Image (cartoon, grey):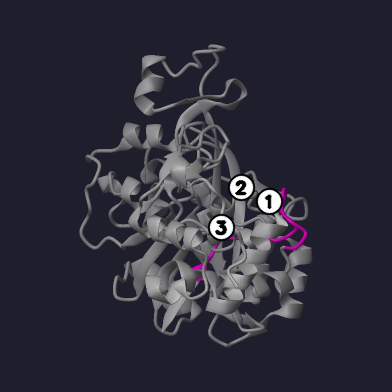
Amino acid sequence: MRIIADLHIHSKFSRATSGEMVIEHLSRAAKIKGIDLLGTGDFTHPTWLKELKERLNPLGNGLFIHKGTHYILTAEVSNIFFQEGKIRKIHNIIFAPDFETVEKINRRLSRFGNLTADGRPILRLPAKDLVTEVLETSPLSMMIPGHIWTPHFSLFGSNNGFDSIEECFGDNKAHIYALETGLSSDPEMNWRLSSLDRFTLISNSDAHSPSRLGREANIFEGELSYEELTTILKEKDRLKFLLTTEYFPEEGKYHYDGHRKCQVVLSPKESLAHKNLCPVCRRRLTIGVMHRVEELADREEGFVPKNSIPFKRLVPLEEIISKAIEKGRDTAAVEAEYQRLIQHFGSEFRILLDLDEEEMKEAMPPKILKGIIRVRRGELIIRPGYDGEYGEISLFKKEEDKPVQLTFF
């Protein structure tokens, strides 16, 4: 049985997050997307934890269920600390097997920050010490560095991260088994560092609203339990971890270097030619993920390590519809067509991954179908994201720019 899992999301109690990030809406959105397993996010927040206890039904295997959607207890924390003469800011994801363990983790972490202030609390605690705090609550707990290349708040971030796993976690590096690639990187970029070969690379949405669930995800094979899932990640089991689905990394907010205020976007080579300074205002550029990968890589582009987990790059269905009908992604017209297609075909992941062209022809406008096929083939043009600005996708050439008329029936 195929399991699609999005293990890193947030609740309404995190900053800049939709008020619809509650269990009812999450379970409904997961069905629409075709997601089988969601991380709860934010279990460190006492009010959200209370809601989780009230609404989730335990299955007895470390997972929980609500209206057909399975959940695993997760949280993200922001570690801010001083190490080696520099302030470090690292986001880390925590997995826990049960509510009892969550309560123990929360009691420990409350010594280092205010857990009620935000669903993703700030902890004045080194990342390596967080590993100790989490594992001492239960050996079944697990910690995974989040979106490891984002310039701000990440393991390898250009602004305040580290150059290696060892530098960040010290002796506790042996307890780090998996890394989250984040929206601005994909496995292929991470494969350029031989030091990352032993880690399982996972991909998640980090969603702040229900519509963004599943924009990256993990696909497993078989019946899952908490222990089975964490074992797959620890052992990098290619028989049970089938693939990840990825944003095109160029779409990420920090793929290239740049300065948003001056609308300057540069490749790593172009940035170096300008000594990493904005050519307009001469201030320091925000160094993006590609630049940082180039700094740390010891392999050329295209290298594929042995035992690596495959991946597929996708574009969300709403975004494809938006490009086809030339309406904003969050408009009523896009939402109406999205819901029509979901009602007819079952789920977004089924449309993006499973259906063949002939099956889709029966109920899909030709231009939307063409967009889906082009995404599958990688036939698209992307303006890379930079300095907090998402990249932009072009699926259709100018001569195809006439928007589709949604009068298919």
Q: Residue placed at 56% from the left, 57% from the top?
A: 321
Q: Residue at x 29, y 38 (%)?
A: 297
Report the side of 187 relative to 103 (left or right): left
Check disc 1 and give the amino acid type: Pro
Cβ atoms at labels 2 and 1 below 8 Å apart:
yes
Label 1 Cα neighbours within 10 Å, binned few <14 / some 14-19 / many ≥20: many
Q: Position of residue 179 (x, y in %)?
A: 42, 55
Residue receiving disc 1: 121
Task: Using the image as rendered, state which of residue 220 and residue 129 is in the foreground.
Answer: 220
Q: Which residue is mark 2?
A: 78
The answer to which of marks 3 and 2 sits earlier in the sequence is: 2
Instruction: Name the chief secondary structure element in magenta.
Output: loop
Question: For this rendering, which residue is in front, 257 or 306?
Answer: 257
Q: Which mark is residue 362?
A: none
Place of residue 95 in the rendered image (x, y in percent of width and height, measured from the top left): 54, 66
Res 346 → quadrant: bottom right
Disc 3: which residue: 321
**Highlighted range, magenta:** 5-20
Question: Which quadrant, please, contains the C terminus?
Answer: bottom right
